[in-house]
Amino acid sequence: MCTEPGCGAGDESSEWARTVKELGEVVRASRHGVLVMANCLVGRAACRLRHPAPLVVVQPCDAHRRPTALAMWVGPVRTAADVAELGGWLADGDLEPALLSARLLRIHRRSATAPLN
C-alpha cells in the first residue's frame, strides 16, 4: 500500500487511514497475509495528477508466500464502502479480480491494458 501524500497518507480522517486499519485487521486475521507499505506505486508525477486516494497492490501467494498469480492493482479506494469491499474480498481469500466492483479495478484495468497500446 502506498504511503505518499498523493494517496492520502498522513491524513487520519481520510480513506487512507481507514484502509490501513481495515487491511491491518484482515492481515492479522489471515494465516499467511502480509501488509507491505511502500513509497509511491505509480510514480510521483502521476500521483500528483490524481485525486488523493489509496492504491493497493495484491499478490496472491501460497502458504509459503510464493506468488501463484500476477499482482493486481486495486483502487483507488475512495469511500468507506470501498474499504469494506476490499477488506471482505481479501478476507474471503478468492482473489479473483472479477469479484471486485469496477470502481476498485479502475487502475488494474489501466495497468493491464497499457502494454497493449
Image: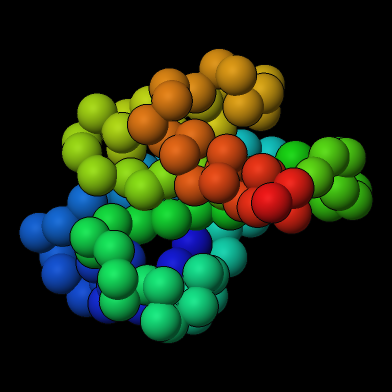
> Whole-percent x and y of residue 11?
15, 69
Q: Residue shown at 67%/23% (left/top)?
A: 96
Q: Closest to the observer: 32 or 103? A: 103
Q: Nearer the viewer, residue 61 or 101?
A: 101
Is residue 53 shown above or below 64? below
Query: As drawn, is 8 to the left or to the right of 77?
Result: left
Q: Residue at x 55, y 17 (%)?
A: 99
Up the image or down, 50 lies above or below 44; here it is: above
Q: Single out the residue that lies furthest toward the top.
A: 99
> What residue is drawn where x is 22% and y is 51%?
15
The image quarter in which residue 93 lies:
top right
| Residue 113: image location, x then y, percent | 66, 44
Q: Is residue 15 visible?
A: yes
Classify 32 as above or below 14: above
Q: How is the image coloured?
A: rainbow
- Count the marks: how many? 0
Q: Which x, y percent locates residue 80?
A: 20, 36
Residue found 30% across the figure and 71% down from its top: 49
Residue 92 in the figure: left or right of residue 84: right
| Residue 27 point in image, percent of width and height | 54, 46
Image check: 100 left or right of 96? left
Q: Report the residue that reaches farthest toward the front.
A: 117
